[in-house]
Amino acid sequence: MQGWKGNIKKNKLTPLFFFFTAIFISCLIVSNIIAVKLINIFGLVLPAAIIIFPITYIFGDILTEVYGYKMARLVIWLGFFSNLIVVVFIKIAEVIPPAQFWDAQQAYSRILGYTPRILTASFIAYLVGEFLNSFVLSKMKIWTKGRFLWTRTIGSTLVGQLADSGVFITIAFIGKLPLLVLFKIIITQWLFKVSYEALVTPFTYLVVGFLKRKEKIDTFDLDTNFNPLRLFEI
């Protein structure tokens, strides 16, 4: 590391940054809405969110790799507050008395009416998982001097997704399911998400390469404060 300083540039909010931020937040919100449905994939029973939620980690990796931890931190918090707004207004719509001729109130509540415990688990797991993912990738980029992108995208996902699945399943279902069942669910979801990340690694390479060339930026977080609460520091 001696004598190596990396490429440090002042980040700026560009159209491409906003574009990928929008994708990140959209995938997050959609995953929380469709998570209520259980699907069968190769004999594994998983929430439907499994088909889109890992994309938030992929784009989280891309944002951290190109723009750095500070910008990724901003996006993570934007995703959190955007999702909170969606949840609040879905709940408000649920409690407002329905029109007399509208007979789908029960269906609405069943699909969109999250319990407080599930919501708490979801919000905490999201923040813990995303911040760990971004932190690990940022640190690994320094350790590898910007080489071997695949090691940090997969390595950060191993940590972030394990934390996400572990926190969510534990908070949401502990006391309702045996510990062995909880452990199996956590490991199954974790392995599926990591495999998802590994399969799309070529796509990640393409997008990262495109953004670095187009934006002319490749951020190394050498002097970054990694406190996740400093959301207004960019």
Image (cartoon, rainbow, N blue to C red):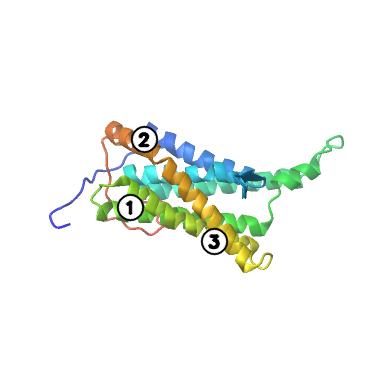
Q: Is residue 29 left or right of residue 98?
A: left
Q: Can the viewer see residue 222?
A: no
Determine the image quadrant of residue 48: top right
Check disc 2 and report its element: helix, strand or loop: helix
User: Which corner quadrant of the image does residue 118 belong to?
Assistant: bottom right
What residue is at 81 percent from the left and 40 percent from the top?
A: 98
Badge 1: how crowded within 10 Å, few (<14), some, or many (20+)?
Answer: many
Position of residue 109 measured from the top left corner of the image (x, y, whole percent): 75, 46
Identify the element where label 1 is drawn: helix
Counting from the top left corner in percent of width and height, residue 165 is at: 54, 57
Q: Which residue is mark 1?
A: 138
Query: In terms of sequence position, does the residue under pointer 3 or pointer 2 come before the other?
Result: 3
58 relative position to 152: left or right: right
Determine which residue is flagged by label 2: 207
Q: CA distance from mark 3 to mark 1?
A: 22 Å
Evaluate whether residue 172 shows in this view: yes
> Label 1 near label 2: C-beta < 8 Å?
no
- Circle 3 residue: 167
Q: Amino acid at mark 1?
A: Ser
Q: Quadrant of the N terminus?
A: bottom left
| Residue 66, position as x, y percentages in the image | 32, 42
